[in-house]
């Protein structure tokens, strides 16, 4: 049987090489469909929209954990190799570093060619804001902010739960994240029903976002950025973000890149003023998209190294 830590590293390598093959079945798609399928019955059977959302969230996350555990147990009973392969596949589907990099760099290509219409279409796949009227600077900022926030959601948090709880933890986290993406909107339909999904996602990302701040600062230090300055600026600015978690990676990326993020954003036709993150040491430019992707990759590797060191130390101390 392959060690869990090695399984995680193999899965990271697969993600880096293959990304997310669109034609293959993906657990997140099944989780999303299951959540939507449960919404209608839950609303009909439970008068309170908030309680219906709580029950739906519990069923989706609990069901994902139980099914993953059962499938893992069945695979291990077939053979140790089958168990290893299932674990690696589960980890591989939970990590999204390559997919995030591909989406971000896909925005940079038409932007470099001056094709703003194509760049707007590409960035719309990354962000929830209105993109129809974004200029080049707005497209760049939206892309860098998305890479920063999704470094936690798509990579660091799944890694955190993978090291702690194995495949069950990694896919359990993806279920919570998928629920937020499906129901976590502050609109008339989901303000109450999506409350539990949004709060669960906040809770799941609480520690990864804060531990990720250290990883981002270390990754920035690899290229000469000041480690303590990144921590100081990120800690200073992150508290101003409306999200309890998103401010940490966004402020840390801004500090590491020496740019300022945040500012006006249009959502559903309404302008919103987002808090400013970082100091404008240099103007935000197109090349910062590639720089943010490189920072995300270094952050991922550092987080995996820290997780590996923690697992080794735990075992050396007598942990199972």
Image (cartoon, grey):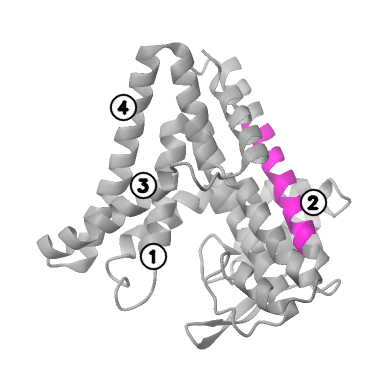
Mark 2, mark 1: which one is toward the viewer? 1
> In this rendering, would 127 be left or right of 292?
left
Contact (Cβ within 8 Å) of mark 2 with mark 1? no
Tell me how far mark 4 sits from mark 3, CA to CA. Answer: 16 Å
Q: Is mark 2 on a helix, strand or loop?
A: helix
Contact (Cβ within 8 Å) of mark 1 with mark 4? no
Residue indicated by mark 3: 30
In this rendering, the answer to whether 266 lies above or below 181 is below
Circle number at residue 184: 1
In this rendering, the answer to whether 223 lies above or below 250 is above
Q: Which residue occupies 27% across, 66% down?
A: 193
Q: Give the range drawn in magenta.
A: 289-307
Tag 3 or tag 4, which sits nearer the N-term? 3
Tag 1 or tag 2, which sits nearer the N-term? 1
Contact (Cβ within 8 Å) of mark 3 with mark 2? no
Q: Position of residue 224 (x, y in %)?
A: 89, 51
Circle number at residue 70: 4
Q: Where is residue 293 in the image (x, y as percent from the top left)?
A: 73, 54
Residue indicated by mark 2: 220
């Amino acid at each position: 049987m392959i060690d869990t830590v090695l399984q995680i590293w193999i899965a990271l390598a697969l993600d880096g090489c293959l990304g997310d093959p669109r034609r293959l079945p993906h657990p997140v798609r099944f989780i999303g469909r299951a959540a939507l399928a449960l919404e209608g019955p839950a609303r009909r059977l439970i008068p309170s929209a908030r309680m219906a959302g709580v029950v739906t969230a519990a069923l989706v996350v609990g069901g994902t954990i139980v099914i993953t555990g059962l499938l893992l147990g069945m695979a291990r009973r077939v053979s140790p190799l089958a168990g290893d392969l299932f674990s690696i596949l589960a980890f591989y589907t939970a990590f999204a570093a390559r997919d995030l990099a591909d989406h971000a760099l896909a925005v940079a290509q038409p932007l470099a060619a001056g094709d703003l219409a194509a760049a707007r279409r590409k960035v719309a796949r990354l962000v929830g804001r209105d993109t129809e009227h974004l200029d080049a600077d707005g497209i760049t900022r939206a892309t860098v902010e998305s890479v920063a926030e999704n470094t936690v959601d798509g990579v660091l948090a799944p890694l955190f739960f993978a090291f702690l709880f194995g495949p069950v933890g990694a896919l359990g986290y993806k279920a919570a994240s998928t629920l937020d993406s499906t129901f976590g909107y502050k609109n008339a339909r989901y303000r109450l029903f999506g409350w539990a999904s949004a709060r669960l996602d906040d809770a799941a990302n609480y520690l990864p976002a804060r531990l990720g701040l250290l990883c981002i600062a270390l990754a920035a230090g690899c290229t000469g950025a000041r480690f303590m300055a990144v921590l100081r600026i990120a800690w200073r600015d992150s508290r101003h973000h409306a999200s309890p978690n998103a401010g940490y990676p966004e402020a840390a990326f801004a500090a590491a890149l020496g740019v300022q993020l945040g500012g006006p954003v249009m959502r559903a036709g309404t302008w919103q003023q987002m808090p400013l993150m970082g100091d404008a040491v240099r103007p935000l430019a197109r090349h910062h998209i590639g720089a943010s992707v490189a920072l995300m990759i270094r952050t991922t590797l550092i987080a995996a190294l820290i997780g590996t060191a923690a697992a080794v130390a735990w075992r050396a101390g007598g942990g199972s």
